[in-house]
Image (tube, rainbow, N blue to C red):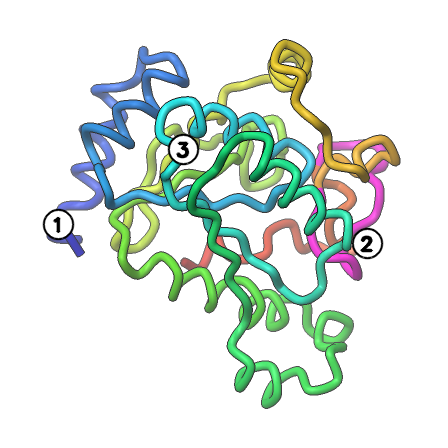
Amino acid sequence: MGHDHHQTPARAAALQASYASSTTPELLRAMMTREFPGRLAVVSSFGAESAVILHLVSRIAPATPVIFLDTGKLFGQTAAYRQQLTDWLGLKDVRVIVPNAGDLAKRDPAGDLWRRDPDACCAIRKVAPLRAALAGFDAWITGRKSFQGGARAKLPVIETAGKMIKINPLTHWPVQWIDDYYAAHALPRHPLHEFGFTSIGCHPCTVPAGQGDTRSGRWAGTDKTECGIHTHL
């Protein structure tokens, strides 16, 4: 790592203070070019609202690494959308990360672990691969927002994640800003958006959102609200 991880909370607090009044583009530019040049990645699901953060990043530094987790359980439409957005925005370094084949063979040979233990499924299909993919970076950018509710309701712009700094540039954006941004820049929507999917993850564990927060369609009918990459990484 490029810095002493014992200093990570202090660094996060200092960055939060320094950029508290920055606009989202200003914040992103500072993080990518001044604070963590060459040491920062974007983690994107290429989901329902992903085009906003990816568009902002592409206008500042299109060669920024973008990490995409292909769990092996995604909607086919997500792969197509990833390619569409990558081409549309001119992203130069989209890295498709997959689970470790040995882990899958040992722990989920039939591919049905999601049904028995969704936390364990997420751990081997998302958390472990992302941890490995982020090993060479000091900071990462997410597209999480406070309006998504649950554990995200009081999300800071800059926080710590283990030894890393995690940046949530859109945390204070309301839904209307997201919709307005798509319209203003004529950004394509995920193909499933028109069918009521406001948050799009793996196929077996995602349904159209009902009443409630925008992530209510994820792991519907259970207490689970996060895959684990934002709680165990």
Which numbered disc, 3 or 2, marks the residue that appears first in the sequence? 3
The residue under label 2 is 221
Mark 2, secondary structure of its residue = loop
Q: Is residue 92 visible?
A: yes
* Lateral position of residue 58 relative to residue 69, left or right: left
Q: Nearer the viewer, residue 212 or 23?
A: 23
Give the crowd class for mark 2: few <14, some 14-19, many >=20 residues within 10 Å.
few
Q: CA distance from mark 3 to mark 1?
A: 25 Å
- Report which residue position mark 3 lands on: 62
* Residue under label 1: 3
The answer to if 51 sits in the magenta stretch is no
Magenta residues?
200-214
**Residue 38 percent coordinates (x, y):** 24, 43
Q: Position of residue 142 (x, y in %)?
A: 46, 39
Please, is residue 4 above or below residue 103 in the view? above
Amino acid, disc 1:
His
- The three-letter code of the residue at mark 3 reads Pro
Identify the mark nearer the N-term, 2 or 1.
Answer: 1
Q: Is residue 181 above or below residue 74?
A: above
Q: Answer above or below: position of 155 versus 132.
A: above
Quadrant (top left/top right/bottom left/bottom right) for the C terminus: bottom left
Q: Dot 3: within a 10 Å radius of its alpha carbon, few (fewer than 14), some, or many (20 or more) residues?
A: some
